[in-house]
Image (tube, grey):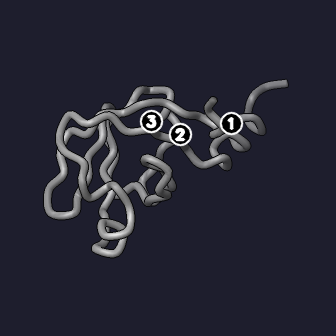
Amino acid sequence: MFTGIVRERGRVVSFDDGQLTVEAPSEILRYCVEKGSITVDGVALTVAELTDEAFTVALVPHTLEVTTLGALESGDPVNLEVDILAKYVERLVRPA
């Protein structure tokens, strides 16, 4: 059972020098902004870069040591969730 606000699957595009790039469905990317929050496999991270198809996060050594994210490779699937604030904003600006 999914318990997040929006939960989808993404795919690792690349993981180089602490930069993790994930291809994500539009249902996730619509809520992403640079410097905003995204959760990858249960780890809350900050979006460093954003394109129409993917986002990139920077992983610090501590995160790589204490999570499973350090073992990711290109092509691996990942679970994605967006920050609840994005859903609140969407609801507030939706016409009544």
Question: Given this view, does label 1 or label 3 mark the residue nearer the observer?
Answer: 3
Structural crowding at the residue carrying mark 3, measured as other residues with C-alpha within 10 Å and reported as few (<14), some (14–19) or many (≥20): some
Q: Which mark is residue 90?
A: 1
- Label number found at residue 31: 2
Q: Nearer the viewer, residue 84 or 77?
A: 77
Name the amino acid type tagged 3: Leu
Task: Reply above or below: 13 against 1.
Answer: below
Element carrying mark 3: helix
- Asked if residue 94 is positioned above or below residue 83 in the image, the reply reads above
Q: Position of residue 4 (x, y in %)?
A: 63, 40
Q: Are marks 1 and 3 in contact (CB under 8 Å)?
A: no
Residue at image coords 38%, 68%? 66
Q: Position of residue 83 (x, y in %)?
A: 60, 49
Q: Which mark is residue 26?
A: none
Amino acid at pointer 1: Glu
Q: CA distance from mark 1 to mark 3?
A: 14 Å
Contact flag, marks 2 and 1 (Cβ < 8 Å): yes
Q: Residue furthest left?
A: 16
Which residue: 75% across, 35% down? 91
Report the Cα–Cα distance between label 2 and label 3.
5 Å
Residue 29 percent across, percent down from the top left: 44, 35
Q: Residue at x 85, y 24 (%)?
A: 96
Query: Mark 1 or mark 3, which has the lower sequence index?
Result: 3
Badge 2 marks a residue whose secondary structure is loop
Q: Which residue is mark 3?
A: 29
- The answer to whether mark 2 and mark 3 are in CB contact below 8 A is yes
Residue at x-position 54% and y-position 33%: 7
Q: Position of residue 61 (x, y in %)?
A: 28, 74
Query: Crowding near pointer 2: few (<14 within 10 Å), some, many (20+)?
Result: many
Q: Is residue 35 above or below residue 33?
A: below
N-terminal of the pair, mark 2 or mark 1, is: 2
